Image: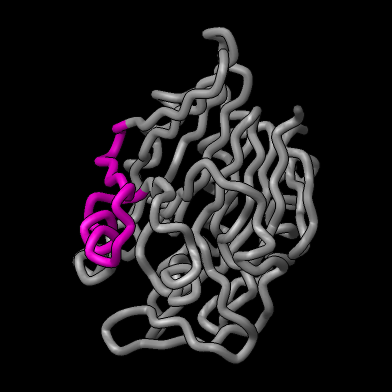
Amino acid sequence: MTPEVTFVGTATTVLRIGGFTLLTDPNFLHRGQRAYLGRGLWSKRSTDPALTIPELPPLDAVVLSHLHGDHFDRVARRGLDKALPILTTPQAERKLRRWGFGAAEGLPTWRAYELHRGDETLRLTALPGQHGPGLLDRALPDVMGSLIDLEQGGQRRFRLYVTGDTLRRPQLAEIPARFPDIDAMLIHLGGTRIAGILLTLDARQGADVVELIRPRLTVPIHYDDYPVFRSPLRHFVEEARRRGFAGQVRTVSRGETVPLTP
């Protein structure tokens, strides 16, 4: 089966990779509902998710980049199966377990977690990420990127990088050094700004990360669901065209399913 992604909205996707199905960053708030961003800050959602929790397919695990209200909301907290493995940061694991998600698994950077089915192995490795600049990052939740490898019969068949809410930072350079030949990347964009401070990749930083990682295919997500997202998708597409890699970018609409192969 060709690896594919269904875009639900924000950073929420359903990934079908081999015989495995994953949910990323579950945000199921609807238009007009507010996501809590911490430190007394809220943002009102501008869009509706393409799916509700009851409409999701059977899941093998949830991949959670960090514990912010636009990535794991009160709807997910109430509605997701408490027995589902949630692969996330150690910081988020502690809170999720207090909420009853007993299978939450906190992964330090470079630590891996495996799922097995028949002769297939799906390996998720936690990658570095940094949500905020300088000392401000300490006031924000820890964040991780994710590398998802599918192996069949001991041979790697597919490699996906999900950036999480990170900025372009020097530590990202270790990702392609350790994990070359990345087939596809889901890139969290949006250029989130709060009090004028950039907290997620905007068009220029996003293009820099594409040039650093050099995936065969880039699929942008996390770009227009909240007013704090200030860098629209078209800016990234224009930057990709200017730099000459627009042919390796595949945009996806909410509710649409697209293959993760070039």
Residue 83 screen position, x and y as percent: 40, 51
Relative to 90, say whether 248 is above or below.
Answer: above
- Quadrant occupied by the C terminus: top right
Identify the image quadrant of residue 193.
bottom left
Residue 7 screen position, x and y as percent: 69, 57
**Residue occupying image coordinates x 54% and y 57%:** 188
**Residue occupying image coordinates x 69% and y 38%:** 217
Identify the image quadrant of residue 189.
bottom right
Q: Report if residue 58 lies within the magenta region.
A: no
Q: Is residue 54 left or right of residue 253?
A: left
Q: Report if residue 100 lies within the magenta region.
A: yes
Q: Nearer the viewer, residue 251 or 231?
A: 251
Q: How many marks?
A: 0
**Residue occupying image coordinates x 37% and y 59%:** 66
- Quadrant occupied by the N terminus: top right
What segment carries the magenta color? 88-111
Q: Nearer the viewer, residue 199 or 85?
A: 85
**Residue occupying image coordinates x 72% and y 40%:** 4
Residue 253 screen position, x and y as percent: 78, 62
Q: Nearer the viewer, residue 227 or 51?
A: 51
